[in-house]
Image (tube, coloured by chain):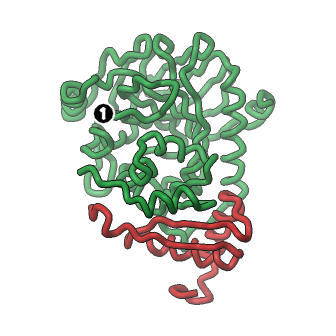
Chain colours: A red, B green
Amino acid sequence: MFIYSADNKRIFENARFVLEDIAEMKAGDTVVVIADRECYTNARALCDTAKALGGNVMIIDIDMYGGE
Amino acid sequence: MKLPVMEPLRQAILHADIVFMATDQMRTDFGMFLGNSDECDTALLGHSRRFTFESGGMDRWELNKEEVLRNRTRTLKLYEWLKTAKEIRITTELGTDLTCDLAKSVDAMYPVMAIIPFYAEVAVIPSLETVNGVIVADGASEFAYGQRGFPIRPAFRGHQELWMEPMKLEFKDSYLVNYTGDPVQVARLKKLMEDVSPAPDLCDEIGLVTTTSIENDMYGWLVDGSHQTRCVHVAIGNNRRRGEIIHSDEHVDFDIHRPTVYVDGEMIFDGENFLDDVIDAHAK
């Protein structure tokens, strides 16, 4: 885990719910998160959790795309 | 500014099993990334597992997981019922009384399942000549001018106008035939009608919001304050491809708070809660 301290369980529990119960992610799935600086916290949590669940993960940072 | 399609991004989206767009959905969408505006609508449905992650504050959510999942189940059941239903009626204490004649025909209907985690809706794209009555929009409207301009009835941080007189929109045979309200908001809508061609004078959508998770309002839709729980939204727009897409070039949702919603004369939402037993009984 890169950003979060281990005791911040809630963000990972919530990310796990999103991945498993809503997105129906399975181990081996390829997961891409499109992000920018404003949503990077969510993106990182999703990816850290997806990786822990056996996913192949990537964040694509689009901050430089458009730059609005 | 129209941005070029970035082929590496496009290919990543097309070839991933699951994609989350965590960026602001008012500034970005899958249509923009894929170079096909219809993809924006397709991605709302969830079949492709392309999700719009419409929420901040994931470290603070106190999830009622059962409620979130129930919202999603309810959406699919209501969608199944509406496919064979004859009429939707929406009323409010403020004076909304709108009917949509589904029996005559309906151009399209979609369960909106991919704006996650809290949002859910059944979107009805009514046919011409099927929507009649009045809505009293006491909630927010979306950004106008292709979702890039100023809202008709704004409710976002720094510009809050929900204290103003609600906008009253009157529809006849699915056309917007009259509107009244606060002069400032009426002037904005009048200018939109004059500026946009073809004029967005059609009832383009009746959005039956099926989520009751309050986190939807607390952590999502902060950009414009629309799509709140315990609301129905009715959109004006200029959709001439009604059987194919939800969102045309111009599409502005107006939120109606605390509606009573009836399907074929049976109440399914009492302004506060869904009557899930009624929906369950009709779902196939």
Residue A36 x, y percent position in the rendering: 39, 69
Question: Is residue B218 in view from this perspective?
Answer: no
The chain letter under disc 1 is B
- Choose between A66 and B160: the one closer to the eye: A66
Mark 1 lies on a secondary structure that is loop
Occupied quadrant, residue B118 = bottom right
- Residue under numbered circle 1: B165
- Tag 1: amino acid: Glu
Residue B15 x, y percent position in the rendering: 57, 59
In the picture, which quadrant includes the N terminus of chain A?
bottom right
Residue B191 appears left or right of B60: left
Question: Is residue B62 in view from this perspective?
Answer: yes
Is B281 drawn above or below residue B46 in the view shown?
above
- Choose between A7 and A47: the one closer to the eye: A47
In the picture, which quadrant includes the C terminus of chain A?
bottom left
Occupied quadrant, residue B6 = bottom left
